[in-house]
Image (tube, rainbow, N blue to C red):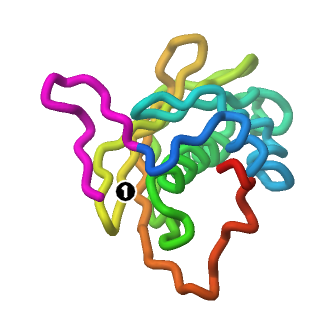
Amino acid sequence: MSRSKEGADDEPQNIWFKRPTPQVLNDIHQGCAIAHLGIRVTEVGDDYIAATMPVDSRTTQPYGLLHGGATVLLVETLGSAASYACIDVDKHFAVGIEVNANHISSARSGYVKGVAKPIHIGFLTHIWEVRVYHEDKLICVSRLTVSVGQRRQERKVTGLLPKNY
């Protein structure tokens, strides 16, 4: 399962076990913090997942700036969704174990866009770099480490995922 980030000619490789659509990921996120904050997956490329999040009363701190915790929730959403798309969810599970975020700038309105790309996709761990932008300006650089474990047969999650996933 170990895959490198780039191919021999530096072209992106398709990293997905089963490539999801943005709609499938958005449907999975309904009814939890992700949807409550207005996070929407917008793109799934060969080696990345992108999503947007509004900068509004749900995601700002009392001073009107984008809350760092909301930004980190966007980061964890992207990295976790990417890890799940890289594994056979009937045999494995993935959970975030460490997140780091450097907030370079902030935003007061509009939308931010996060883009997750792999640094490492191994059998036991995945490491994702997530860059967050506001109006094409980099505002946060983050890294999420995800642990991949073997699922016990009695704990299959197929019922949680749409049949077309």
What residue is rendered at 19% in x and 24% in y? 10
What span is in magenta? Answer: 1-15
On whether residue 10 falls in the magenta region, the answer is yes
Tally of numbered tags: 1
Along the horizontal axis of the image, is 8 left or right of 127? left
Along the horizontal axis of the image, is 125 left or right of 70? left
User: Looking at this view, is 17 or 79 the one in front?
Assistant: 17
Furthest residue to the top? 135
Q: Main secondary structure of the magenta part?
A: loop
Image location (x, y in percent) of residue 29: 75, 49
User: Looking at this view, is 87 or 129 the one in front?
Assistant: 87
User: Looking at this view, is 80 or 23 the one in front?
Assistant: 23
What residue is rendered at 43% in x and 61% in y? 146
Image location (x, y in percent) of residue 135: 59, 11
On whether residue 7 falls in the magenta region, the answer is yes
Q: Amino acid at mark 1?
A: His
Image location (x, y in percent) of residue 138: 47, 21
Furthest residue to the left? 8
Image location (x, y in percent) of residue 73: 63, 48
Residue 150 falls in image quadrant: bottom left
What residue is rendered at 44% in x and 75% in y? 149
Along the horizontal axis of the image, is 36 left or right of 6? right
Does 6 sit above or below residue 128? above
**Quarter of the image where the N terminus is located:** bottom left
The residue that label 1 is drawn on is 126
Along the horizontal axis of the image, is 76 left or right of 24? left
Residue 75 falls in image quadrant: top right
Does 98 sit above or below residue 134? below
Helix, strand or loop at label 1? It is: strand
What residue is rendered at 74% in x and 64% in y? 160
